[in-house]
Image: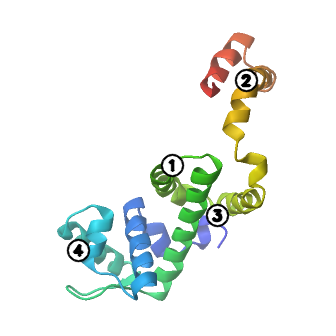
Amino acid sequence: MSSAASESFAERSLTPSLENYLKIIFREEQEGGSAHASVIADAAGVSRATVTSTLKALRGIGLIEYEAYSPIKLTEEGRRIGRDLMHRHIIFREFFQHVLQFDEAQADAIAGEVGSSMPRHVVRRCGRFVLYMQKRKEHWQDWQAEYEKERDALIAGLAGDLARNASLSPEEAEELSKKYR
């Protein structure tokens, strides 16, 4: 599936909230064989009533098997989509935590926000980059300190590039490049 046209109805129907529930259910199913509404409510930070209505929506688009007071199981399509969502989440969490060096909680939260909005080819390229960088930590683990040492020269270069390539005046380019300080 490389384009929006090849996405299933269920994938097109997912909102960020439904995607979050699907990731929770996928993780719970992987760890314990099934998920339970109370665990989902705790993980999502919502009430049990909210979980119930969301589970009905996921069942309605064919991603879970659900009956009140019973364990929740993913359908084959739900498992496939859940796996894809978790894969995206892991890639972006690793990127934000280990490359951009956000703390674990921030990296996890940011990954949850951006992962599903990225096209598959961007996710794939980020995944390759994360794998590449994990093998070469010595080249980048101190990048923030190195950046601070070279910041003024890098920003001056950025301002020049902006002025040349974005048709900005030198003053406009300098103002825009200040955002990177």
Viewer-proximal residue, 175 or 91? Answer: 91
Quarter holding the C terminus is top right
Q: Earlier in the sequence, mark 4 or mark 2?
A: 4
Mark 2 against mark 1, which lies toward the viewer?
1
Alpha carbon distance from label 4 to label 1: 32 Å
Residue located beneath label 4 in the image: 52
Q: Are the residues flagged by discs 3 and 1 in contact, CB closer than 8 Å? A: no
Mark 3 against mark 1, which lies toward the viewer?
1
Specify whether 95 is left or right of 24.
right
Residue 163, position as x, y percentages in the image: 77, 19
Q: Are the residues flagged by discs 2 and 3 in contact, CB closer than 8 Å? A: no
Q: In this picture, is 55 found above or below 67?
A: above
SS label for mark 3: helix
Alpha carbon distance from label 2 to label 3: 31 Å
Residue 144, position as x, y percentages in the image: 67, 37
Q: Label 3 neighbourhood size at 10 Å, few (<14), some (14-19), many (20+)?
A: some
Q: In this picture, is 124 found above or below 138?
A: below
Dot 3 amino acid type? Arg
Say if residue 109 shows up in the picture. yes
Residue located beneath label 3 in the image: 120
Viewer-proximal residue, 164 or 38? Answer: 38
Viewer-proximal residue, 95 or 126? Answer: 95
Q: Earlier in the sequence, mark 2 or mark 3?
A: 3
Residue 151, position as x, y percentages in the image: 72, 25
